[in-house]
Image (cartoon, rainbow, N blue to C red):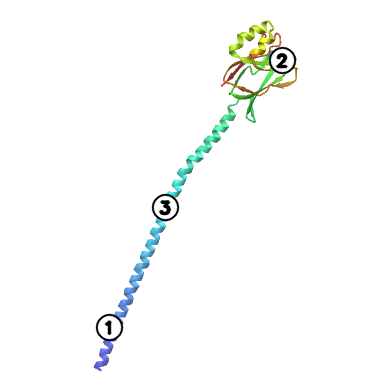
Amino acid sequence: MIRSSKIAIISGIIAIILISAALAVHFRLSETEKNEVESGLEQNEKESASQVIDEIVNSIQNKPESENEQNEIGEENESETILPYYVKMIDGVQVVTVNATELKFVPSEIHINSGMTKFVMVNNGVGEHELVVYDASKKEIVDKAELVEDEETIAKNIIFEIDHTSAGQTAESDIIDLKEGSYVIGCHIPGHYEAGMKGTLTVN
């Protein structure tokens, strides 16, 4: 009887030890799982924060490029819109169209950029007209030559010309590399220049 009681007590003690061990293991596992969960949450928070930072950095880095592109587009559009109505860019050549009416050029004041240039004269008048262009510093020489109809002197001092063009016709000059400066345009068919068929050409 006493032996049976001892065995029962020992069995109870062993059972208590086993239960305690099991509970300890359970608590340790629970603590580990808890740490893993917390670690996972912290990692996710870190990754989320890192992603937000990366997005902000990318946004800052890409913004100037976008603004530069917009500025470039704006500059291109601006360069297109600042061209006068009588100028068109064709294959890198600025083509200047001048209308010749009766004793008047339209426009009579021309402003263009330096570089490769071609002039087109449209004769909307009733008679022949021409377009002669020369440096403004030669104006006095050309004017005097015009008074005495000295064609040789005129020819030596002009930059280029579109020769006599009949009414209703269109003629054009060769392509000229115009330099910066002030020039005079005129029709030197007898009597036309004196009557006011002249103008100015400013090359910037």
Disc 1 versus disc 3: distance between alpha carbons? 54 Å
Q: Toward the viewer: 193 or 85?
A: 193
**At x 61% / y 11%, what residue is drawn?**
139
- Residue type at numbered disc 2: His
Can you say which quadrant of the picture contains the N terminus? bottom left
**At x 44% / y 46%, what residue is drawn?**
57
> Is label 3 in a helix, a strand or a loop?
helix
Please report whichever mark, 2 or 3, sits nearer to the chain's N-terminal start.
3
* Tags 1 and 3 touching, CB below 8 Å: no
**Position in image of residue 49 (x %, y %):** 41, 52
**At x 64% / y 8%, what residue is drawn?**
143
Q: Count residues near mark 3 (Cα–Cα under 10 Å), then give few for <14, some for 14-19, many for 20+.
A: few
Q: Residue furthest bottom?
A: 1
> Is label 1 in a helix, a strand or a loop?
helix
- Residue type at numbered disc 3: Ser
Q: Is residue 90 above or below residue 20?
A: above
Q: Residue furthest left?
A: 2
Q: Give the residue pinned by disc 2.
A: 129
Q: Give the residue pinned by disc 1.
A: 13
Please report whichever mark, 1 or 2, sits nearer to the chain's N-terminal start.
1
Q: Is residue 197 above or below residue 172?
A: above
Q: Give the residue pinned by disc 3.
A: 50
> Is label 2 in a helix, a strand or a loop?
strand
Q: Is residue 64 above or below residue 134?
A: below
Foreground disc of the pair 1, 3:
3
- Residue type at numbered disc 1: Ile
Query: Which of the labelled discs sits on residue 23, or is there none?
Result: none
Q: Is residue 42 above or below residue 112?
A: below
Q: Count residues near mark 1 (Cα–Cα under 10 Å), then give few for <14, some for 14-19, many for 20+.
A: few
**Position in image of residue 133 (x %, y %):** 64, 16
